[in-house]
Amino acid sequence: MDEPYIVASWPCVPVEIVRAAGLRPTFAQGLGDPTPIADSCLEPNIFPSRLRHLVEAARAGLLRGASRIVIARTSDADYKCFLYLREFVRTEAGSAIPPVVLFDLLQSHSEDVRAYDVARTYALVEELGSASGRMPSDDDLRHEIARTNRARAAARRLTELRRIAPRVAGTEVFPLLAAFWEMEPDQYVTLADEAAREIAARSPLTGPRVLLTGAPVDDSALHQAIESAGAVVVAEVGPWGSGAPGEDVRCDDDPVAALADKYRTDVIGPRTPVDAVRRWTGRLLDEVDAVVVSLPLDDAVFGWDYPVLREVLVARRIPHVCLRGSPHESPPPADHARLDAMVAAASQLQETSRG
Amino acid sequence: MVDKQLDSTRAASAFQKQWFAELRRRVFDDRQPYALLQADVPFELFDVAGIPAVSNQWWASMIAAKRQAPQYLDAMDADGLPGGLCRYCSLGYASTRYATAGEPPWGGLPTPRLLCARLTCDCIHRVFSLWADAFGAELFEIDHSGAGDLPVRWWELGRHRWRELVEPHRLAFVASTLEALVDRLETISGRDFDRDALRHRLERVNAQEELFDSVRQLIATAPECPVRMTEQVTNVMATQWVRGSDWALSHARAFRDEVKRRVDAGIAACPGERARLMWVGAGLWHDTSFYTAFEPSHRAVFVWSMYLAFGPDGYIRYGLDDPMAALASRTAGFNEYLHNPPWAAEWIVHQARTHRIDGALVLRPRSMKPAATGRLFIERALEKAGIPVLPIDADVVDGRQWDPEAARGAVRSFLDAQVLQ
C-alpha cells in the first residue's frame, strides 16, 4: 500500500477532492467482527459498527500509514468520534493515530449553511493538498468531477437493472455499487459496464421487491437475510447502495462549491433533513412490494420516522417488517420468521394484483 | 417530597407556576405569540423581541416531576417508537402528540407561534419537526457546527477572551444564523429588534451569573455545604429561563444573600457533613429525593451539579461591543463543554477539586445518546484525580425501569466502600 491514502468515516467526503490531491479514498465500514479496543473507550449503543472499527484500527496502529483520518459531520456519533480520536492523540504519548480532520459539512436547508459548507469544503481542499503536497487546482477538480460523473453514470446503469423487473439480487449488486467510492473511476466504469451487460442479459427475478430503509446499511448482511426468504432487495437507503451514484456533480466555474452542494444534499445520513428522506422513500414505494425498516440500537434518528412511514405503508397495503438488531449480523430466528411472513404476504398481494 | 430549606427555593417554585399561568393567560386571552425552545437556544433574543419562551427541557422535567412521564412514554412505545430513542428531548413532544395519554402540568402547553432548536444531537431535527407538525407551528433551526480547535481550559477564556474560544468561521456562522432568527422574531413580534437592548440584557445576564458565581464560591469554601444541590437547581433554573429579567436578577441576589447568611451563621444543609458528592449529568427528574437520601444515613451531601456551576463559566461574556458575536460564542459550544473531551472532563475535575468533592456519581443515560458520550473520559479523569466514581444507569425522565431502592443501595455501598472508608 504505497499509494498515499486517507480514511474517511462516511462517503460524504468528496472523493473528487481526495483524488485531485493525489490521495486514495478509503472508507470506514461496519462489520460483524468484535472490536475489543474500541469497546473499552466507546460507550455502547451510540457508535455504529463502522466507527467502532475505525477507532479499533486507529488505536491498534493499523492506520498509521494514512495521510489523514477525515471524519465527516454525518452524525453526532461521527463528531464525537472525531473528538475522541483527537483526545487520544492529545493525551497518549506516542499515539499511532494519524492526523484527524473534521469535515464539517452541515446538511440543513439555509443559505448560511450552504455558504458555511462551501467554505469548509475549501478548507478540506487545503488540508488534503497540504497532506499530500499536491494542492489541487480548479482544473484538477473539474477533471476529477468529470471522471467521477462517468463512474456515477455507470453505477446508475446498474441501479436501473434493479428497477421494475429486477434482474439482479441486492446481495450481488450491493458490493458493485459500494465499490464506486473506493475504486478508480475509469476502472469502475469498465467493471460496472461489464457487470451491467451481463446482468441485462438475465431473466427478471421473481419474488417480492423489497425496499430496505431505516438506518443506512453499509454491507449486505441484511440483503442476504431478506433474499434468503425469497424476496429481492431492489433499493436501500444510504450512499453505499442505491444512493451511491446520485446525480452528477455540475462542472462549472466553482468546482468546490459544486462539490459542497452535491454532498450536502445528496448523501443520506442521520443529519439529512427528514423531508429529503421522505421524498427519497416516497419515490420508491411505487416500485416495491414490501419494505424492511432497519433500526439498530445505535440509531438515534430514523426510528422517529417509523410511525409516519408505517401509516403510509398500511394505507398503501405494503407489508413491512421492522428489524432492531445489528445490520451486520444475521437476524435471529424470530426476525427470520417475520421476514418469511412479510415475503409470503407480499407474494400473495403480487399474485392478486396480477390476477 | 423533601422539605425545602431555603425561602428562595419556595419563591422560585412559586414563580415558575405563576409565570406559566401568566404565559397561558397572555397566549389564550391576549393572543400573544410565545416560543418553545431547546434549552441551549439564546433565550435573550426572544426576551428582547418581547416573545416569551418555554424551555423544552424545563417542560420535560416538570412532566417527570409531576409523575406524568410514564403515561406519555407508554404512548410512544405503543406508537412503535423504539425505546432507545432520546426521551428527555422528546417527552414534551409526546405530551402534545399523545395529548390524551396523560395530564400535563398546569393545564399544558398552548400552541406556540414558533419552535426553535439547535441541531446538536441528531434527533433534534426529527423531534422538533414532528412537534412543529403536531402544533401546526413554524420551526426555526440553528445548525450546529463542529469544533476543530479544542481549547482545553475553556472556562478561562469564556469571560474576556471569548473570541479565542470559538474558531472564527464557526463564530461567524452562528452569529449569522442568530441574525436570521432575529429577522423571524421581528416579523413575529411586528417590531424592530433593539440591539442596545440586547447588549443591556447581556450585561444583566452577566450580573446574574456573577451572583451565581458568588454562590458557587460560598458552597465551595464553606466548611459544610449550605444549600442542597436540588435547591441550587430550583433557584438557578427558575432564573436561567428568564435570565437578565428584573425578577431573575432580584431572585439571584436574594438567593445569594440567603446562602451567605446561612454560611455566616454556620447553617449547613446536612450538619455533620461527612462526604461531599457531585452529580455529573442531567438531573433525575423523576426521583429528586434520591439526592437527599444519603444525608440521614451517611451525612453525604450532593454539593455540585452542572446547573449552578455552568452559569458563571458558560454564560458570562465581557466586552459586549458586538453583542450578537458574544451570544454566538456562548451558543456555539454549549454541549461540548458539558459532555465531551477535552472540555468536560477537564472542567469537571477542576470543579471537583475546588468543591472538595469526595465522590462522584456519573449518570449513564439510558436513552440520551449524545449526553451519554464522553462519560468514560469523565469517569477516568475523575478517578485519575483520586475521586471515586459510581456510574448510575438511569434515564432522567423515564423512571419506568428505575429501581429506587436498588440505586440507593448501590450508593450506600459506594459510600461505605470507597468514600468513607
Image (spheres, helix red, strand yellow):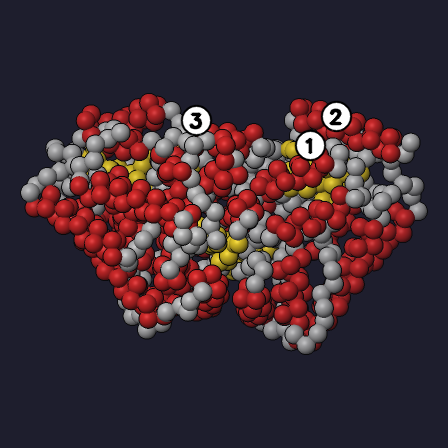
- Considering only vertical position in the picture, is A269 above or below B413? below
**Residue A148 position in % (x across, y down):** 74, 63
Q: Which residue is label 3 attached to?
A: B401
**Residue A12 position in % (x across, y down):** 63, 57
Question: Residues under labels 1 and 2: Cα distance?
Answer: 9 Å
Left or right of A344, for residue B140: left
Residue occupying image coordinates x 56% and y 63%: A110
Seen from the viewer's position, the closer of residues B409 and B284 is B284
Q: Amino acid at mark 3?
A: Gln
Residue occupying image coordinates x 38% and y 50%: B26
Question: Residues under labels 3 and 1: Cα distance?
Answer: 27 Å
Callout 3 secondary element: loop
Q: Which mark is residue A341?
A: 2
User: Hey, which quadrant is residue B231 in on the image?
Assistant: top left
In contact (CB < 8 Å): disc 2 and disc 3: no
Residue occupying image coordinates x 75% and y 49%: A283
In the rendered structure, the residue with mark 2 lies on which chain?
A
In contact (CB < 8 Å): disc 1 and disc 2: yes
Q: Have a look at marks 3 and 1 and say if they share a chain.
A: no
Q: Quadrant of the C terminus of chain B?
A: top left
Q: Amino acid at mark 1?
A: Val
Q: Have a look at marks 1 and 2 and say if they share a chain.
A: yes
Q: Which residue is label 1 attached to?
A: A321
**Residue A31 position in % (x across, y down):** 63, 40
User: Hey, which quadrant is residue B352 in on the image?
Assistant: top left
